[in-house]
Image (cartoon, coloured by chain):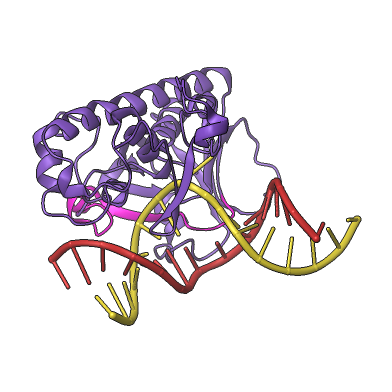
Chain colours: A purple, B red, C yellow
DNA sequence: CACACAACCTGTCAGC
DNA sequence: TGCTGACAGGTTGTGT
């Protein structure tokens, strides 16, 4: 479910409710998610104050007092829902329940259990297995045409697969890769190595723009609903190619009946949506 | 090393 | 209505 913009939205929602509060009670309802949860997981969290909440790629970092960090990933189906307490009976797939000292309740629900949680000493965070190899943040200053070009150089995989690789750039998922390639007019089949210079110069702003717009849409979701549940919010109505097989792509002037509109193909086992006329 | 692909687990939806 | 198969926004591990 969640790519970078959704995780960012969840982090902002959680920060609003959790920062400055204390974890009065933590309930762990199973021993593992994608990976085994750390020993004494709930006990180590209980009583801690939440100092700040940050995002790295698609990871949520909940910094607690004593230098402990709760590192969480929502996987495909995970969500964090904030509501007023008291905690009711847990629903199906409610795996972890955080009760705050002001009565708010945060529930981590994950049907597919591709999500994960770990506890990390803040000082060890940069060397954590899940974070150490991540590429640059696409919305950060360290991400630019030169950096992207260099990271794509010599790679013989399609640009679609390269952009999904979290070590190339961190936080993009299937949807936003499709959208960014469409916006920059680059075919998803093009070899990564050939996306340098002028093509990277178009791709970088396309990535930044689509993510920024999606976060803004998520922000509006945050305002309208108290929940931070990782849903795609209003932005899903703005997809230009994703999930639009056979339809006209945004701003399309060609005859869809004749051209077939947006095409769907499968690359490394995942759906790619693109416009073969606008993307080369 | 770089790449493709299966696997993880559950829910949903289209088609019969 | 019920069954089956395809598919789902992510990441890791294995095999070539």
- Compared with residue A118, is residue C5 higher up or lower down, i.e. above or below? below
In the picture, which quadrant includes the C terminus of chain A?
top left
Quick one: A232 or A106, which is closer to the camera?
Answer: A232
Quick one: A17 or C9, which is closer to the camera?
Answer: C9
Lateral position of residue A224 relative to residue A266, left or right: right
Where residue A105 appears, x then y in whole percent?
Answer: 57, 37
- Residue segment shown in magenta: A110-132
Quick one: A194 or A105, which is closer to the camera?
Answer: A194
- A212 is within the stretch colored magenta: no
Where residue A129 appears, x then y in whole percent?
Answer: 25, 60
Q: Residue at x 54, y 30 (%)?
A: A256
> In which quadrant of the rendered view does residue A118 lie?
bottom left
Q: Can residue A27 be seen at all in this image of the molecule?
A: yes
- Compared with residue A99, is residue A226 higher up or lower down, i.e. above or below? above
Where residue A191 appears, x then y in whole percent?
Answer: 22, 50
Q: Can residue A104 be seen at all in this image of the molecule?
A: no
> In which quadrant of the rendered view does residue A88 lie?
top right
Q: Residue at x 53, y 22 (%)?
A: A221
Where residue A178 appears, x then y in whole percent?
Answer: 39, 39
Q: Residue at x 45, y 34 (%)?
A: A10
Q: Residue at x 39, y 30 (%)?
A: A19
Number of marks in picture = 0
């Amino acid at each position: 479910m969640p790519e970078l913009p959704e995780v960012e939205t969840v982090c902002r929602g959680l920060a609003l409710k959790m920062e400055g509060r204390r974890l009065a009670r933590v309930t762990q309802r199973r021993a593992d998610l994608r990976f085994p949860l750390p020993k004494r997981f709930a006990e180590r969290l209980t009583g801690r104050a939440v100092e700040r909440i940050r995002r790295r790629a698609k990871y949520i970092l909940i910094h607690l007092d004593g230098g402990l960090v709760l590192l969480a990933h929502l996987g495909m189906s995970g969500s964090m829902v904030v509501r007023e307490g008291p905690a009711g009976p847990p629903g199906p797939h409610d795996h972890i329940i955080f009760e705050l000292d002001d009565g708010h309740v945060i529930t981590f629900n994950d049907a597919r259990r591709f999500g994960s949680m770990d506890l990390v000493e803040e000082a060890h965070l940069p060397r954590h297995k899940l974070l150490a190899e991540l590429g640059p943040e696409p919305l950060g200053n360290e991400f630019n045409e030169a950096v992207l070009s260099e990271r794509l150089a010599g790679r013989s995989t399609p640009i679609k697969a390269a952009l999904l690789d979290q070590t190339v750039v961190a936080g993009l998922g299937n949807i936003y890769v499709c959208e960014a390639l469409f916006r920059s007019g680059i075919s998803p089949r093009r070899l990564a190595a050939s996306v340098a210079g002028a093509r990277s110069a178009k791709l970088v702003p396309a990535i930044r723009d689509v993510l920024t717009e999606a976060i803004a849409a998520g922000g509006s979701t945050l305002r309208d609903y108290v929940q931070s549940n990782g849903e795609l919010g209003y932005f899903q109505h703005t997809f230009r190619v994703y999930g639009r097989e056979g339809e006209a792509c945004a701003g399309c002037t060609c005859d869809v009946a004749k051209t077939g509109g947006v095409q769907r193909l499968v690359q490394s086992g995942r759906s790619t949506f693109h416009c073969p006329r606008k993307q080369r």
